[in-house]
Image (cartoon, rainbow, N blue to C red):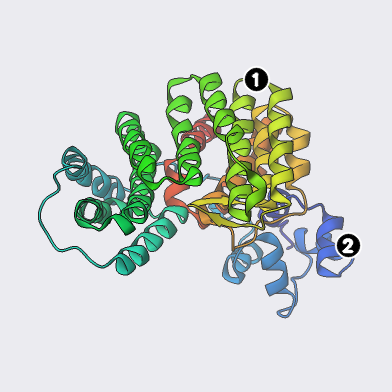
Amino acid sequence: MRIRRTALAARRAAVGYSQEALAEKLGVDRTTIARWEHGQGKPQPWTRPKLAAALGISVDQLGTLLDNPLPSWAVASPPSPVATPDLAATIASQLPTLRQVLDACDMPDDGPTRSIGQLRDVVTAVVGHRLESNYGLLARELPALLSELMRARLSCSDSVRGEIAGLLVQAYRAADAVADKYGHYDLSARIIELMRQTAQETDDELVSAAVSYVRTEVFFANGKLDTGRRLLEHAASSMTPGRSASAAATYGALHMRAAVTAARARQPGLARDHLAEAEQAAQRAPEGVYLGTAFGPSSVRIHQVSLGVELGDVGAALTAARNWIPSPAIPAERRSHFYIDVARAHMQAGAHDNARAALFSAQSIAPEHTNSHPLVREMVGQFAR
């Protein structure tokens, strides 16, 4: 007996493909896609890697869709939005130590201090962990690293003090990510203020602008969206974006976040103007990570989906997502944001199966980010109702 592969069809829709578009991507007839989804045969082994890549899943996950017509993650239960007890306990257990380190920022505990080259490598790795949403690991490692960077800043020569301060800003940002993602907004605001003060020691306008980007989290949390948008506009207006790709990316990231801030404040005109400015900046900055922030044409496209969702324009959100899969080169947190917003768009359209499939994609990319995201919790509540 043939059994319709509902989950395969839901997965295709979740990543924005029609049957025709997916067939064109794979170089097959539309009827071939229809037969697979209706349980009439399976893709040949040599076709499966390309199909899995188009759907943004592994070949093993594709096998699950083909062999099990109703996998729980696709058509029954959405991903759990609750962090695992072990992870939640790890983060909670480290916060008192982190607070103690912050209390002693100008009088850190004695201990060894590595060379600036070694510290540079360690902080680069920490930025990578943040971008990949490895919050449990960060919670364990950051207190000791922050204390070491504070010692280095006090003992280093004037010639490298600005660079040490820049490394400390990035480590603070990683600590803020842990605090913000798990709802410790007072701690997040405290860390961001330390970031702001430390950025002044770098004498680098790009570092200060990047801190303004992060500082908007405070205004997201307290609801002062207009204040957050004006902060971003002020930071962008003081920059010279044409002097380098990094400057263009930082300038574009400020406008990209200002677009989301305006959209949440129900200011569609301002939101679209800011995103258009970010799109212009992306023409001068290839996709990459600049001062700890992902930016480029793909990041702008992801934010087009976000704007559509925030403004209630489901058509615009799904159009921006259609026939497109974020490259694995984009940090996991940013890619998972894309699928969370795709899920939100499908929820607004009443396509719950597609929303579940999109949430599965988000969770498979960045489980710690997805499981802790308040909008995912909200969607799961809607599924339950």
Residue type marked 1: Arg
Which residue in the protein does label 2 denote? 31
Residue 161: in sight, yes or no? yes
**Badge nearest the viewer, 2 or 1:** 1
Q: Secondary structure at mark 1?
A: loop
Image vertical order of residue 344 relative to residue 117, above or below: above
Residue 320 falls left or right of residue 191: right
Looking at marks 2 and 1 on the same chain, the residue that comes earlier in the sequence is marked by 2
Residue 350: in sight, yes or no? no
Residue 175 falls left or right of residue 12: left
Binning the other alpha carbons within 10 Å of mark 1 as few (below 14), some (14 to 19) or many (20 upward) gives some
Q: Position of residue 66 (x, y in %)?
A: 66, 65
The residue that appears at 56% across and 50% down in the rendered structure is: 334
Q: In whole angstroms, how far apart are the C-alphas of marks 2 and 1?
A: 43 Å
Binning the other alpha carbons within 10 Å of mark 2 as few (below 14), some (14 to 19) or many (20 upward) gives few
Q: Nearer the viewer, residue 262 or 254?
A: 254
Which residue in the protein does label 1 denote? 266
Q: Position of residue 134 (x, y in %)?
A: 39, 55
Residue type marked 2: Thr
Picture quadrant where residue 309 is located? top right
Of all residues, the one furthest to the bottom in this rendering is 46
Image vertical order of residue 43 relative to residue 363, above or below: below
Residue 20 falls left or right of residue 244: right
Q: Nearer the viewer, residue 22 or 209?
A: 209
- Give the total of numbered labels: 2
Quadrant of the drawing holding the N terminus: bottom right
Picture quadrant where residue 172 is located? top left
Q: Secondary structure at mark 2?
A: helix
Labels 2 & 1 near each other (Cβ < 8 A): no
